[in-house]
């Protein structure tokens, strides 16, 4: 009988230890996502105090305003559109493994699009339109195989439209109008069904009819 009680006690201790390990793992995950978002907060000017609730001392960021989590306390949405924010994006955003929606449209965000956003394998919507973002569209966005909405219009983007995006079969909406892109408009893959006005007002961007007659990066030098 004593042996039975000893065995049961050992099992209880083991389960208790596993519960603690699991709790620590969840907390660490929550902290890593909180750290990534807090890095974004530190890089932004926030005159309207919309990020006031972003407290890095909390176990996870799921109670922060403008942040949505799933049932496992993993960040799935960041909704900061039209929030009068300025500053720049940070590479730490690429650590939000379960992020599906990154909404930062209609702000005054400057700088470039971090290539690390290509690590957001769950991303469905990337909305950065109506900012002052410069630099090129990262080729790493071609790794976002769940991406449906890519709206980068009304910025100061340069360079060609990455051909890597033609392999993202989930893409339904692409808008890069009102930038300074160059080269030719892709016509393969999801781009076959993207209306041409989603590419307009890029003075150096050539029409799709030149595909095959001109290199994809023509006018980019």
Image (cartoon, helix red, strand yellow):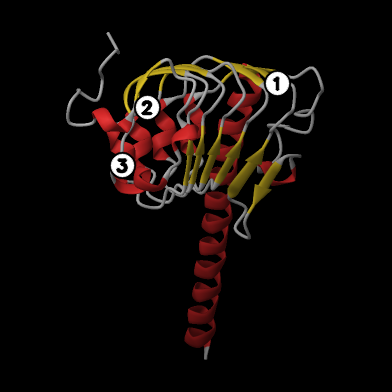
In the displayed structure image, the side of residue 201 where residue 116 appears, left or right: left
- Looking at the picture, how far across and down is residue 47, in whole percent? 79, 17
- Name which of mark 2 and mark 3 comes first in the sequence: 2
Q: Which residue, given by chain and number where applicable, does mark 3 sit on?
A: 166
SS under mark 3: helix
Task: Name the quadrant of the C terminus.
Answer: top left
Camera-nearest residue between 155 and 215: 215
Compared with 152, 157 (above or below) is above
Q: Please identify the quarter of the rendering in which residue 61 is found.
A: top right
The picture quadrant where one finds residue 28 is top right
Tell me if 92 is positioned left or right of 184 in this view. Answer: right
Measured Cα–Cα span from mark 3 to mark 1: 32 Å
Label located before the other in sequence (3 or 1): 1
Residue mark closest to the camera, 3 vs 1: 3
View extreme (bottom): residue: 1
For the residues bearing labels 3 and 1, Cβ distance under 8 angstroms: no
Indicate the position of residue 39 as horizontal and vertical percent values: 59, 25
Residue at 54% x, 83% y is 5
Distance from disc 2 to disc 3, alpha carbons, whole Å, reads: 13 Å
Q: Position of residue 85 (x, y in %)?
A: 70, 21
Dot 1 falls on a residue whose secondary structure is: loop
- Name the residue beneath numbered marker 1: 85
- Camera-nearest residue between 155 and 142: 155
Mark 2 vs mark 3: give the one in front.
Answer: 3
Q: Which residue is mark 2?
A: 138
- Identified at 56% across, 32% down, the residue is 36
Q: Residue furthest left?
A: 213
Q: Is residue 64 above or below residue 200?
A: below
Query: Residue 51 appears at what percent x and percent y?
Result: 75, 29
> 10 Å neighbourhood of mark 3: few (<14), some, or many (≥20)?
some
């Amino acid at each position: 009988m004593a042996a039975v009680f000893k065995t049961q006690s050992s099992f209880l201790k083991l389960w208790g230890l596993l519960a603690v390990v699991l709790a620590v793992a969840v907390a660490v995950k929550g902290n890593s996502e909180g750290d990534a978002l807090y890095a974004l907060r530190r890089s932004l000017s926030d005159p309207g105090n919309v990020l006031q609730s972003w407290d890095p001392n909390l176990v996870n960021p799921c109670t922060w305003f403008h942040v949505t989590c799933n049932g496992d306390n993993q960040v799935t949405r960041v909704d900061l559109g039209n929030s009068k924010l300025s500053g720049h994006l940070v590479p730490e955003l690429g650590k939000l493994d379960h992020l599906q929606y990154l909404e930062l449209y209609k702000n005054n965000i400057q700088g470039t699009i971090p290539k690390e956003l290509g690590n957001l394998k769950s991303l469905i919507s990337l909305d950065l339109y109506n900012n002052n973002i410069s630099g090129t569209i990262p080729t790493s966005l071609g790794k976002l195989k769940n991406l449906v909405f890519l709206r980068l219009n009304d910025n100061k983007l340069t360079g060609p439209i990455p051909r890597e995006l033609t392999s993202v079969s989930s893409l339904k909406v692409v808008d890069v109008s009102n930038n300074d892109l160059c080269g030719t408009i892709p016509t393969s893959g999801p781009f076959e069904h993207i209306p041409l006005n989603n590419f307009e007002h890029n003075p150096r961007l050539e029409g799709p009819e030149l595909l095959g007659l001109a290199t994809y990066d023509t006018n980019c030098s």
